[in-house]
Amino acid sequence: MAKPNYAFAKRQKEIAKKKKKEEKRLLKLEAAESQSQDVEPVPESPDKTEITDGT
């Protein structure tokens, strides 16, 4: 009977874990992009962005 190849099994498990992590990252990225498209950017007026020290 052949002995189990633990290194191969470990590598396959790591590959599966990496693939699942990448899919989850892409899903979160798509969700963030769709969320940012739903929200309208608020235009800032130029007078509010400048800070003066009053001198």
Image (cartoon, grey):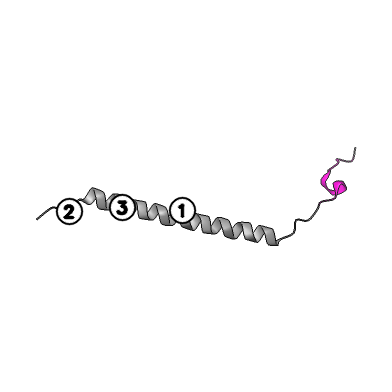
Badge 2 amino acid: Pro
Q: Residue furthest right?
A: 55
Badge 1 amino acid: Glu
Query: Which residue is denoted by mark 2 in the rendering?
Result: 4
Query: Which residue is denoted by mark 1 in the rendering?
Result: 22
Q: Would you say 28 lies left or right of 37 here? A: left
For the residue labelled by badge 2, is the local secondary structure a helix, a strand or a loop?
Answer: loop
Image spot of residue 55 (x, y percent): 90, 37
Q: Residues within 10 Å of mark 3 (few under 14, many from 20)?
A: few
Q: Would you say 30 lies left or right of 10 here? A: right
Q: Would you say 24 lies left or right of 16 here? A: right
**What label sits on residue 12 in the rendered view?**
3
Residue situated in front as seen by the camera: 8 or 51: 8
**What label sits on residue 42 in the rendered view?**
none
Q: Earlier in the sequence, mark 2 or mark 3?
A: 2
Q: Residue at x 34, y 51 (%)?
A: 14
For the residue labelled by badge 1, is the local secondary structure a helix, a strand or a loop?
Answer: helix
- Report if residue 46 lies within the magenta region: yes
Q: Residues within 10 Å of mark 2 (few under 14, many from 20)?
A: few
Image spot of residue 37 (x, y percent): 68, 58
**What is the distance, in whole Å, between disc 2 and disc 3 at their CAs?**
14 Å
Q: Residue at x 58, y 60 (%)?
A: 31
Q: Residue furthest front?
A: 1
**What is the distance, in whole Å, between disc 1 and disc 2 at their CAs?**
29 Å
Tell me, yes or no, whether the two marked residues, 1 and 3, touch with CB atoms within 8 Å: no
Q: Earlier in the sequence, mark 1 or mark 3?
A: 3
- Report if residue 4 lies within the magenta region: no
Residue situated in front as seen by the camera: 1 or 35: 1
